[in-house]
Image (cartoon, rainbow, N blue to C red):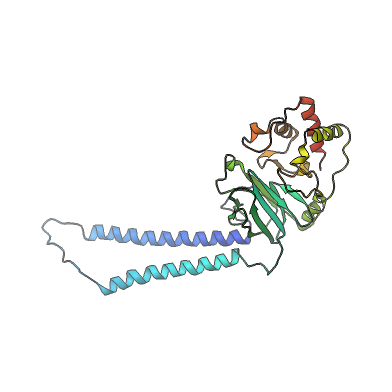
């Protein structure tokens, strides 16, 4: 997973990076001019033994015009380029245009839902070289959706959805995080955006909307444990379950790269999470289930069958 804010991977972030580089160069030029004038003044007008006191200057219209006009010109240039960049990054959507996906912030995970019913957690898939309109919202506190290489920051405010364009120039898994302090596990409220070719994205989207296969063997025993523990009260296991999510959707969880936005999705890590979720992400809303080792193994087998 790539996490490098200095390597833009979308047209929007290229524009932001270009604006930043321009401001940095402009600031460096201004600094050099000011530092040079200060250095020149220190040398040219330093006190010398036996020299007469310098003649005071009480006003200069030329100097006053210059130090008013030059900063005004600089600020105007900054304003014009900033507005142009903002207009490109936040290109308006068509009136009534529905979002291509809805991203919702929870304490402390990210939910992504697509129009075909597919839902995933902490892993957002987009096609390469095609711009998607994402609606950003929250169900609890203020979060901030940010994937540095693909898009600008966007606050997720309860009751006030915002919109952002997501686009990637090349395939890859790009890291993201919540950029607004939102509670105990704010630092680990992470996610990834997976950009893939259009055909692969379409296949992934269709697969995510499919119902899970009937479990067999150890996975079938895990289904019983899942029901007994009432895991379904908080977690959906298919796109057909459209209830409001209390916990991350587990539909096709075995196909995801990460667990909880931070752990590699392996059998060992999945079993650790099931056995003691608070030991991995303290403060999350999932209680310790107090399962036997056999119960943990069965439930792990069931979840690994959700592909």
The reply, left or right, for residue 155 in relation to residue 203 is: left
Q: Quadrant of the N terminus?
A: top right
Where residue 180 appears, as percent x and y from the top left, is 55, 48
The reply, left or right, for residue 188 in relation to residue 257 is: left
Where residue 17 appears, as percent x and y from the top left, is 55, 59
Q: Is residue 243 above or below residue 14?
A: above
Q: Observer-nearest residue: 302 or 203?
A: 302
Q: Observer-nearest residue: 23 or 84?
A: 84
- Look at 13% across and 55% down and name the residue there: 49
Q: How many marks?
A: 0
- Residue 248 image-quadrant placement: top right
Q: Observer-nearest residue: 195 or 303?
A: 303
- Residue 262 image-quadrant placement: top right
Where residue 294 appears, as percent x and y from the top left, is 79, 26
Q: Quadrant of the C terminus?
A: top right
Where residue 40 appears, as percent x and y from the top left, is 28, 60
Q: Residue furthest left?
A: 50
- Look at 63% across and 36% down and name the residue there: 281
- Residue 265 image-quadrant placement: top right
């Amino acid at each position: 997973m790539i996490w490098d804010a200095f390597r833009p991977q979308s047209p929007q972030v290229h524009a932001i990076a270009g604006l930043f580089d321009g401001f940095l160069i402009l600031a460096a030029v201004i600094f050099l001019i000011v530092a040079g004038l200060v250095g020149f003044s220190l040398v040219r007008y330093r006190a010398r033994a036996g020299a007469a006191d310098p003649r005071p200057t009480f006003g200069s219209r030329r100097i006053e015009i210059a130090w008013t006009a030059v900063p005004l010109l600089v600020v105007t240039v900054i304003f014009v380029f900033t507005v142009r960049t903002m207009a490109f990054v936040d290109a308006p959507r068509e009136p009534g245009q529905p979002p291509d996906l809805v991203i919702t912030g929870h304490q402390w995970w990210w939910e992504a839902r697509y129009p075909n019913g597919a839902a995933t957690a902490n892993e957002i898939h987009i096609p390469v070289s095609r711009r998607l309109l994402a609606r950003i919202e929250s169900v609890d506190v203020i979060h901030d959706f940010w994937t540095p290489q693909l898009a600008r920051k966007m606050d997720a405010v309860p009751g006030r959805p915002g919109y952002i364009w997501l686009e990637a120039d090349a395939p890859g898994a790009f890291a993201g995080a919540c950029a607004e302090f939102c509670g105990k596990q704010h630092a680990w409220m992470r996610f990834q955006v997976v950009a893939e070719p259009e055909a692969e994205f379409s296949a992934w989207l269709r697969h995510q909307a499919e119902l899970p296969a009937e479990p067999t063997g150890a996975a079938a025993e895990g289904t019983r444990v899942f029901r007994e523990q009432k895991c379904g009260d908080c977690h959906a296991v298919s796109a057909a379950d459209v209830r409001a999510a209390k916990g991350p959707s587990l539909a096709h969880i075995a196909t995801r790269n990460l667990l909880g936005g931070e752990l590699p999705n392996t059998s060992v890590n999945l079993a650790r999470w099931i056995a003691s979720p608070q030991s991995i992400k303290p403060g999350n809303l999932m209680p310790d289930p107090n399962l036997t080792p056999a119960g943990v193994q069965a439930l792990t087998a069931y979840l690994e069958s959700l592909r």
